[in-house]
Structure formats: C-alpha cells, structure tokens
Amino acid sequence: MQSFTEENYLKIIYHLSLNNDHAVLTNAIAEKMQTKPASVTDMIKKLADKELVDYKKYQGVKLTPKGKLSAVNIVRKHRLWEVFLVDKLNFKWDEVHDIAEELEHINSAELIERLDEFLSFPKNDPHGDPIPDRNGKFDHMAVVKLNKLKPADAGLIMGVSEHSSPFLKHLEKLGLTLGKHISIIEVTDFDGSIELLLEDKKISVSREVAKHILIKI
Amino acid sequence: MQSFTEENYLKIIYHLSLNNDHAVLTNAIAEKMQTKPASVTDMIKKLADKELVDYKKYQGVKLTPKGKLSAVNIVRKHRLWEVFLVDKLNFKWDEVHDIAEELEHINSAELIERLDEFLSFPKNDPHGDPIPDRNGKFDHMAVVKLNKLKPADAGLIMGVSEHSSPFLKHLEKLGLTLGKHISIIEVTDFDGSIELLLEDKKISVSREVAKHILIKI
DNA sequence: TTATTTTTTTAGATTTGTCTAAATTTAAAA
DNA sequence: TTTTAAATTTAGACAAATCTAAAAAAATAA
Ligand SMILES: [Mn+2]
Ligand SMILES: [Mn+2]
Ligand SMILES: [Mn+2]
Ligand SMILES: [Mn+2]
C-alpha cells in the first residue's frame, strides 16, 4: 500500500507525462507538488525502489506499468468523487477539486465500484475529463483547443484544461459550460481574442481563456 | 488542524470516557489504538499542549471542551458516512466501519453539511448510534441491555454496543435487526441464555450476545 | 508498613517526509 | 571549447509518530 504522499507524487508524474513521452523532470514535479527539488529526488528514489517509476540520475522519471496503473486508479477515484459531489451533493464544478483531492486516497475497491454504480457509470467528470474504468482504460477525446479554431469553425464544449476556481467561475459567468455549442465569428489579430456565437448569443473571450477550453468539432 | 492520528486518539478517548467520568487511562488508550503505552504518553503530551486534553502525570486524561467538540465532530462524520454507505451504496451494516474509519477524516465542513442534507438529516447510524448535530448535540437514547430484561418484558431493538463484523452478521442471521420487536419468554438460570419472541418467531440468544443488544421498552 | 506487581513515564532509536546548503552534472552561451 | 548558468543530487538536519528497554510512580498484597 502507498502513502498519501506517494499517491500524490504518482498522480502528478502521470499528469506531467500525458502530453509528451519524455521522462518527467525533477523540477517540474517539485513545482506541482509545491515542494523542493531535493525532496522530489528523495521520493523518486523511494518510488524507484518500489518499482513504480524508472529512474536514471539527472534524466528524470517514467512510470512503470505498475506505477501507471496505480496513478490511473487514483485519477479514477478523484473523478468519480467529483461526479458525486456535483451530481448528488450539488456542489459547483469549481468547488470540488480540493475535496476530491482528499477523497481520492480512501482505500476501498468495493467502495469505488459501488460509487461508480450509484452514479450510473459516468464516462466523464464535471470538467469533461474521462473517467478510467477499473482496469485503467478510457477513451481519449478527440478535442481541439478553442484558440486553435478559425472563423466559421463550430463545435461543442467538451472540457477544460485548467481547473482553478477563478477560471471555472469565469466560464460559468460567460455561460461557457460543458455541452454548449459554439461557432467562431472572428479572431482578433493583435491579441488573439475570439468573438464567437455561444448557442445564439454573441460573446468574446480572451486568448488566455480560449487556450483552456476543449472543443469537439 | 489535527492529523489523522490525533483525531483517532481524540475519538478513542471520547468513547472511553462515555460511560464513566473518571479520567481515561494510558493503557486503555493503548489497547484501543493497538499501540504501546509509551506511544500513548507521547501523544497525550502533544494533545495536552494543544489544549485538547487535561493531563496530570500518572492520572490519565480528560477531554477539554475543545477536545470534546473535536471528537464529537469526528463521530458525527463517521456516522453520517456509515449511513451513506448503507442507505445509498447498499453496503451491509457489518461492512461499513473500516471505510467510515477513513472517511471520517475528510476535512470539509461544507461536505458534511451537504451529506447530512442528502441523507435527509438522519438521527441514527446503521447501528442505532445517535448522530450529533453540527454543534455536537444529540439525544441520549433511553435503552436497556437485553440481558437485563426479565420474562414478560418487551421492547424494540434500538442499537448494538458491539460493531464487529462477526457479531453483526450473527444478529442478521437471527433476524435481530434494528426496529424489530422482541419479548422475553424465559431466562435460563445456569448460562443466562434468553429465549424470546422476535416478532412472532421463537429464538434463543446467548448471554454474551444479549449483552450487546440495546432495547427500548 | 514493607514488598511485590502493575501502570506509566523517560531515554534513546527508527522511519517517513521534509528542508537548507553545498556539491555535482548537464545544458547553454560565449 | 571553455565559461557560465541551470538543473539535479547529496549531505546533514529536523519534526512527527512510533518502538524497545529501563526507570519511576502508584496500586495491591503480604
Ligand atoms: Mn491528493
Ligand atoms: Mn476534474
Ligand atoms: Mn479513523
Ligand atoms: Mn456505527
């Protein structure tokens, strides 16, 4: 069994290795863990001893299959709890992350299976992220970041790549929530801000915001 | 904020001080915590520093009002989660204790208030124990242990004072579950076993089992 | 009341996860 | 390629929670 700390490291290494298959670097982990590089090196050695990561000095780490399965399982729990909090306890999508950050470490396979069933086997969490099944498998969404779209492009909001409360509250205010249809009217040259049709309403979003909205065309 | 360990100590001290108002002794805590008396002494000093317990060397500890409020709050969380597990996730009453033992440490007042509401503000947990309100208040049940009853006495099963899985499974098998009506037929002299009418069925329970069944007359 | 047993505390060590400061390795710039 | 800068690791220390063995206090028995 792993400690909470080890689980948090595994999850962060997993997320950092999602969008590239380079090894994950010590400083990157330190930043996400809000800790010092020296502490990360210590923990990496421990995870390597347990064969949860492959580690070569100065070269960063990669999850082993065993480490990846463990990490994906924590992600599964995190996302199922987020669905519970939003669907059953009526939390807003910007309020659930920190609580799920604790709940994800509760250790009972039976609990998670029953929670999954209670929630009717959801495929995505409140932020649109896919929920892995008990074997760690999930479908990769075919999505594009909103800032990559061109005038006349259209699609559905499928997720967000930034989970901070201020960002999510901002989207909520604009009406940019999951499942909504958007189509691009115009992209301003000098600042990259985007004018778009949200359902039938005309709104404008900054490039910075658009970068974190995921669209299925 | 308290660590999981501190919270477990507080809860155990609380439970040990429920049925008598003497100070709680070091060895009693050690036994419940499944740890060594020396470790208990170390932790007691820490809790005393935080003004969660009053402590005089060799004289045992008592919870301060602050410590008691904290302990009762953990009990509240434990019991609400047990209700959730049984009522919503269909766990049996003998399967929930260990999971609730973890869930009780999740730290979010908002979560517990919403969970309470989601469960329709239950007054008792699956074992009949009262659930304190957010201020730590709850009604004390007026109950008698089954082994204290005499022939012709009758009442309802309101709770159990033993939470082990084997014991609860045994009661389940006999049909001795919460809310059932019983009336005493006969108490055997030499072993204290009790013959009783459970609803309309005649059954027999040992003195040892009867000791842990709580009856409202 | 003195001796014996039980309970509790102290002393000193260990494990886990963290830190700072210094040394080492790798990467980038001149 | 040498110099400089950045990233990473090591060395040594610390706080939390635990342990074992030994000392001290309290309770019980003689
Ligand atoms: Mn976490
Ligand atoms: Mn999420
Ligand atoms: Mn607990
Ligand atoms: Mn209970």
Image: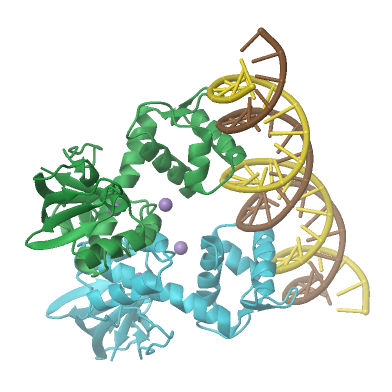
Chain colours: A green, B cyan, C yellow, D brown
Q: Compared with residue B12, is residue A153 higher up or lower down, i.e. above or below?
A: above
Identify the image quadrant of residue A120. bottom left
- The structure residue drawn at horizontal position 42% and vertical position 37%, both measured from the top left corner, is A13
- Whether residue B93 is visible, yes or no, is no
Compared to residue B50, the image places residue A66 above or below, namely above
Q: Residue most toward the front?
A: A190
Q: Residue B141: horizontal and vertical position, in percent?
A: 35, 88
Q: Quadrant of residue A36?
A: top right
Left or right, A144 with respect to D14, comes to: left
User: B209 or C3, which is in the foreground?
Assistant: B209
Position of B116 with respect to B50 (left or right) is left
Find ligand 4 in the image and state its quadrant. bottom left
Q: What residue is rendered at 37% in x and 31% in y?
A: A66
Q: Position of residue B190 (x, y in %)?
A: 38, 76
Closer-to-camera residue (B56/B184): B56
Between B199 and A42, the one lying in front of the other is: A42
- Please name whichever residue, B170 or A117, is drawn nearer the observer in this view of the structure: A117
Whole-percent x and y of residue A3?
Answer: 48, 46
Residue B94 spot, x, y in % from top left: 30, 62
Q: Quadrant of residue B62?
A: bottom right
Residue extending farthest left: A200
* Residue at position x 75%, y 74% in the image: B57
B165 above or below D25?
Answer: above
Q: Quadrant of the N terminus of chain A?
A: top left
